[in-house]
Image (cartoon, rainbow, N blue to C red):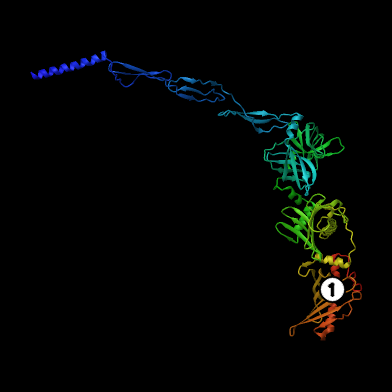
Amino acid sequence: MSKRIILTLLTAMTMLLLVATFSSCFRFSHEHRFSDWTVAEKATCTQEGTRICSCVCGEKQTQSIPALGHTTVVDAAVTATCKDDGKTEGTHCRVCNTVLKAQTTIQATGHKYDDGYVIKKATCKESGKKSYSCIVEGCNVSYLGDYSLPTYSATDIYNQSVNYVGEITTYDKSGKEIGLATGFVISEDGEIVTNYHVIDGAYSAQIQIGEKVYPIEFILAYDVDIDLAILKIEADETLSVATVCKEAVSTGETVYAIGSSRGLTNTYSQGIITHADRVISEITYIQHDASITNGNSGGPLINAYGEVIGINTWGISNSQNLNFAIFTGELDNLVYGEPISLDEFFFSNDSSYSILIDWLFENYTYSDDEFVCFEERTPYAIYSVSYDVIEGYLYLEAFYYFTDDSEAYFSIDLSGGSNQYMYYASFTDGVYENEMFGYIYAESFTESTILTYEFSDGGIWDDDSLLDQYTAFAVDLVSWFDYMTVYYETDVYIYEFGFESFEITSAEETPYDILADDIMLRGTYNADTETYTVQISYEALGQSGVFMITYDAKNDEILVFFECYATSPAQWGAGTGIRLVDTVNGYEYVGMFVLSDPNVGVISNTTEGHIDPATFTDSTVLTYDTYEGLEEQTSEILYTYQVSLCGTLDALNEYLTASGLNITIADLGFNLYQ
């Protein structure tokens, strides 16, 4: 009973709760309890979606989901080819495949050919062959075709040529302009064609092409007989190049000449070929009537195709334009050698300068890696010709020294190629010094020319007085150079260096002076004793020995000495000398005698005395002033000296004859000796 009652009560209570709950929902407000959001409709690239949630009471809520937007993908462009169409770049949506940017069609290009590769060169006479290739990427199509050279108007050819034709200016060693000519460019890196005679004798040169000036750096090839040269310049940019034709030309063709006629840059003329292949001295020329004159040398002769067919070289004056250009085919006869600079070429060529330099290298007094010098000394000066190997300068130099310890130096730079030479002079008295620079104009230089100067510095002396002294030095140095070139057989003469007006007139030298000068030229110099000595082996009068002739520069004396082995007395060796003080009187002899005896040893004898050259003969009995040693044999010793003295005079006379000095011992006072 009790369990049934309890169960009934619980059921009733549950029912009451449900009734109460439903009554509150429908009759009374309450707090909704919504579920999680769920997607009712998905969003797309272009349309919104929705999502919902609900309460147990049946209440619902709805929200929109934004459209996703397109995901862009690029459709790559396709390059059109010769045969296939291409497309422009486009885009589409990766999600919905909607086309966002449509691609358009690019029509196939068809073949596009390059300018062609020359298989066979075209000439003005015959068509050539070219291989033409399609330049469209991925296409390998090509074909062979004919081509011909275009012809140009006179104006077109002029406008082309001024880009590769230049005016050449040449200079001597002093920088003086010596010539104007023409050249033209044949390679992008700066090879220039011109005539050989344009650079002959030039120490440096430049070429102006348009507004730019380029130094001529090297000679690459040349031929004197053909009269052609190939030069080299250095350029920062790529140069315009002439087209050179070496095919045979025809008489009657139109031709053009351009060059610096008489210094008028890029003068242009037109004519025809009047003879296609005029051969002169085995060189082929093109004869034409296009006007050329001085300054056109080395310039191009151009045909109607713009090709250079000749190098203008010479013409016959007063001959109605009989002009000649070396046929360009002659360029093939030039042989490229080791590049040589113009200054090196100047001295290596067979000019007076190069001949003298060659002589210096063969006959120098001293030399090192940078300097070669031929030197000659006198009692008061040292003269020299010097060549600076590094700088390429050729100098005449003189160093003068005086009894009061004053010194002077005078130098003439002979490196020029013209008649204008720079000089440098200096003088010092131990306290004050002077330096002076100026120019010597060789063509007008004489012994009476008073020098002028460009610059003078130092010292306390009046410039005019110094110029008088320096003029004397200049005359002295040029006089020595004149003498030296002839005496030493250098194969050059001072007139070849421009000194055509120079002629030294001085007091006639005495026989004594002539002999002294010759000894200084031929002799070996001893700086310690200030002497010059010539030594010669000699045999005469039954004697053999050594003949020596010495000039004592310090005391201005000539010493003639003969050392011999006499035949009588046996085993005696004798030496006899003559001291020449002047040419009239004062001659002295001194003898030395040596007796060689194995039992006694060496016994010496010295005898001094005088001789009178005016009365001396080979039978003169000598006397003495002092005598020492071997007195018991005086007469034999004096006889030996007399024989030795005669041998000395014979040797001296033979020396004078062999030297070609045109003096004899009679001119020295021994007028009775035979």
Q: Kindly tell me whether residue 520 is visible in this rendering.
A: yes
At x 76% / y 48%, what residue is drawn?
203
User: Where is residue 27 shown, x and y percent of the image?
Assistant: 26, 13
**Residue 557 place in picture, x, y as percent:** 84, 71
How far across and how far down the image is residue 527, in percent? 76, 67
In this view, the residue farthest toward the top is 27
| Front residue of 20 and 470 | 20
Work out whether residue 392 or residue 315 is closer to the camera in this orientation and state it: 392
Measured along the vertical axis of the image, is residue 231 above or below residue 431?
Answer: above
Position of residue 473 measured from the top left corner of the image (x, y, whole percent): 83, 59
Q: Where is the N terminus found, in terms of image quarters?
A: top left
**Residue most extreme to the left:** 1
Q: Identity of the amino acid at label 1? A: Arg
Residue reaching furthest to the front: 28
Which picture quadrant has residue 124? top right
Place residue 13 in its image quadrant: top left
- Residue closer to the observer: 564 or 3: 3
**Which residue position is annotated with label 1?**
579
Q: Circle 1 sits in a helix, a strand or a loop, which is it?
A: strand
Residue 596 placement: quadrant = bottom right
Residue 226 visible: no
Give neighbour class at mark 1: few <14, some 14-19, many 20+ (Cα, 10 Å). some
